[in-house]
Amino acid sequence: MLSDVGSVAIKRYDLLNREISSDDRLGDFSLYGIPYPGTFVVDNSRRVVERFFQQRYQERFTASSIVLNLGDHIEGIDDDAVEIETNHIVALTYGSDVVVAPGNRFSLVVDVKPKPGIHVYAPGDHLYRVIRVRIDTPNFLRVHALSYPPSEIYHYQPLDETVPVYQQPFRLIQDVTIPMREETAELSAVFGGTLTVHGALEYQACDDEVCYVPSEVPLTWKFHWRPLVRD
């Protein structure tokens, strides 16, 4: 925690929360001058190379989710990954964090490996089902835009059709946030409790001759709750 008299540094980094006027009060403390929560990633040359921001001061990216979204690897993060295999793909599912709390923005990860000769569809201008992660429960989770890696172009000769696909192993990152609410605070009140996230992986697989019926694979992630510190 650093003192920033007059919010000088906050203003220089363009983090000042402009939704709060200088007249707003909470108890005996003025709220004016507080920043939007932001995380700056700095390289060895002291250059800011990435910035991650939230709209609510109670909600923050976890460090592991930032590392994953930057494309870096975290040693041992997939030690407890769950493997799923279908006729078309092999997938590993795991989370960016083992323990989560209200206010955390963390990542649900699906590492997908298409089987030889198989491709699945990336976002683009076509009518095939794009591979995606669907989050069903719990309902209180805020689901953010799914992060896709760069795709490759596939040309289907018989139809003279060009579409974006994935044929090599790739990673999907689905960020979610646990809102800071009374409901989630109560769930995390007892240490040792479990947060279970249910969803599905939707995709359509094709090879050089056949396009298969769109598929849906159930997904589950489990996390431990970290109680809020209220003292």
Image (cartoon, rainbow, N blue to C red):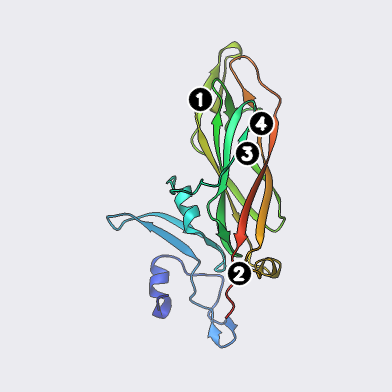
* Amino acid type at mark 1: Ile
In the structure shown, which secondary structural element does the residue marked by tag 3 occupy?
strand
* Amino acid type at mark 3: Arg
Residue 29's x, y, as percent?
Answer: 54, 85
Question: Which mark sits nearer the N-terminus, 3 or 1?
Answer: 3
- The mark lying in front, picked from 1 and 2, is 2
* Amino acid type at mark 4: Arg
Q: Which mark is residue 103?
A: none
Q: Report the residue that reaches farthest toward the top.
A: 158
- The mark lying in front, picked from 3 and 1, is 3
The residue at the point 55 percent across, 20 percent down is 117
In the structure shown, which secondary structural element does the residue marked by tag 4 occupy?
loop
Residue 181's x, y, as percent?
Answer: 67, 68
Q: Confirm or deny contact between disc 3 and disc 2 (CB under 8 A).
A: no
Residue 139 drawn above or below residue 217: below
Q: Which mark is residue 153?
A: 1
* CA gap, disc 3 and disc 4: 9 Å
Residue 144's x, y, as percent?
Answer: 60, 51
Residue wearing tag 3: 132
Residue 23 drawn above or below residue 216: below
- The mark lying in front, picked from 3 and 2, is 2
Residue 227 drawn above or below residue 151: below
Question: Which mark sits nearer the N-terminus, 1 or 2?
Answer: 1
Q: Confirm or deny contact between disc 3 and disc 4 (CB under 8 A).
A: no
Where, quadrant-wise, is the N terminus in this rendering? bottom left
Q: Identify which residue, 200 or 3, lies in the foreground.
A: 200
Label 3, residues with CA under 10 Å away: few <14, some 14-19, many ≥20: many
Question: Which mark sits nearer the N-terminus, 4 or 2?
Answer: 4
* CA gap, disc 1 and disc 4: 16 Å
* CA gap, disc 1 and disc 2: 47 Å
